[in-house]
Image (tube, rainbow, N blue to C red):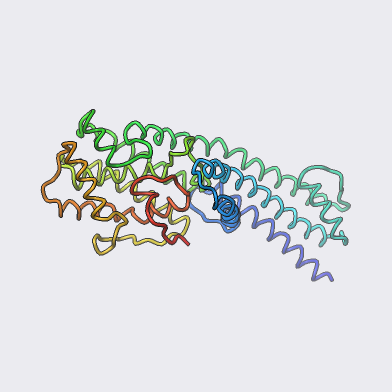
């Protein structure tokens, strides 16, 4: 019997450590650290929401439901952590002399929630009560403390996403962005944006891997999405570098590189498989030549200066797009992004 109690006590310690490690991985560690508990909570809730909205025809209705997804998952995650800690200490209380499991549950719950209606008898049990109460407060404090950090990062992300509407329309489109710059400010002024978007991608990579729930926080407007904004900016830069006849801007190339690296790192968190060294046309892209030619026809009609060698321009565009094509589509599917040209309007891909 003594051996059994020792084993149960050790099991309780391990269970509590699992919950604490999950909290550290989710919020405290400063790098991408996938966690099985957090992943299970988010996946389970996602499947439930998908089942509820599968027959909903209106995207705005679906978006209203999806807006609750990330905040609700975070609250459920906190409850799961607390439940795991409660079970772990229940094991330990039983192992230290409380022979009735229901009484061990009462003592553990009273300690965790600092209610005080069930008291421990021994010094060891009293010490465990203090530790459990502290752990419960720490878990709640962690979530509360990181909410301002998350919403601050969300606000900075969404500021750029919102501003993109004036430059690329709604839903955003790379073709529309180039046409608007051509009609209004001139394509030469487009280069001023690349440094800002490069910084945006760098912060996106940092915040959305360290604080993964941010990936699922939806924009204020149903038609907005950080994923479609990223795709629009990357496609715009790729078209400028490959197709539009303007002076080559190395900052545009750096922006594309910053973008596809950010998308790849976020995909790594979700364990999406992609080729890290793709080559076009050996590795295909989701944009067809017909779709590309339709955009070129719009550019010609509007008088946008284009490079003469169209075949080489297509190969160059594919060479840029192939670096972020699959990561972009995967994130569109994972986040259930609103439909936008050349991003979330593509066919679903396997992200399991």
Residue at figure coordinates x 61%, y 42% from the top left:
143
Q: On the image, which quarter does residue 203 sit in?
A: top left
| Picture residue at 80% right of the left edge, 66% below the top | 5
Residue at coordinates 44% horizontally, 36% vertically from top-left?
158
Q: Is residue 117 left or right of residue 279?
A: right
Q: Residue furthest top?
A: 184
Taking the spot 24% from the left edge, 60% from the top edge, the residue there is: 280
Asked if 124 appears above or below 200 in the picture, the reply is below
Given residues 138 and 221, the one toward you in this image is: 221
- Which image quarter holds the N terminus? bottom right
Q: Is residue 71 left or right of residue 285?
A: right
Q: How many marks?
A: 0
- Residue lying furthest left: 308
Residue 113 location in percent, x, y?
A: 76, 44
Q: Nearer the viewer, residue 302 or 106?
A: 302
Q: Give the quarter of the image for residue 250.
A: top left
Indicate the position of residue 30 as horizontal and vertical percent values.
Answer: 50, 47
Residue 86 spot, x, y in % from top left: 75, 53
Would residue 184 appear left or right of 159 to someone viewing this image?
Answer: left
192 in relation to 23, above or below: above
């Amino acid at each position: 019997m003594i051996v059994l109690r020792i084993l149960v006590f050790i099991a309780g310690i391990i269970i509590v450590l699992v919950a604490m490690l999950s909290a550290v991985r989710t919020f405290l560690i400063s790098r991408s650290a996938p966690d099985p508990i957090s992943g299970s909570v988010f996946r389970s809730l996602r499947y439930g929401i998908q089942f509820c909205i599968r027959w909903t025809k209106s995207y705005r209705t679906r978006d209203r439901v999806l807006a609750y997804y990330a905040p609700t998952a975070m609250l459920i995650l906190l409850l799961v952590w607390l439940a795991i800690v409660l079970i772990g200490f229940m094991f330990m209380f039983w192992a230290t002399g409380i022979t009735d499991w229901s009484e061990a549950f009462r003592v553990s719950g009273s300690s965790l929630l600092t209610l005080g209606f069930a008291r421990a008898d021994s010094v060891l049990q009293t010490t465990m009560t203090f530790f459990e109460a502290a752990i419960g407060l720490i878990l709640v404090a962690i979530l509360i403390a990181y909410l301002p950090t998350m919403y601050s990062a969300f606000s900075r992300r969404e500021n750029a996403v919102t501003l993109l509407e004036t430059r690329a329309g709604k839903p955003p489109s790379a073709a529309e962005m180039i046409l608007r710059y051509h009609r209004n400010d001139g394509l030469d002024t487009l280069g001023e944006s690349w440094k800002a978007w490069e910084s945006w991608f760098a912060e996106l990579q940092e915040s959305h891997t360290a604080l993964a729930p941010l990936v699922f926080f939806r924009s204020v407007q149903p038609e907005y999405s950080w994923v479609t904004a990223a795709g629009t900016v990357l496609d715009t830069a790729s078209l400028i570098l490959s197709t539009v006849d303007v002076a080559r801007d190395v900052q545009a190339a750096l922006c594309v590189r910053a973008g596809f690296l950010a998308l790849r790192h976020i995909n790594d968190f979700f364990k999406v498989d992609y080729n890290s060294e793709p080559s076009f046309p050996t590795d295909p892209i989701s944009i067809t030549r017909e779709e590309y030619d339709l955009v070129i026809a719009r550019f010609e009609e509007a008088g946008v200066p284009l490079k003469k060698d169209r075949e080489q321009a297509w190969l160059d565009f594919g060479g840029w797009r192939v670096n972020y094509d699959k990561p972009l589509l995967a994130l569109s599917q994972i986040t259930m992004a609103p439909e936008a040209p050349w991003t979330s309007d593509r066919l679903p891909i396997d992200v399991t």
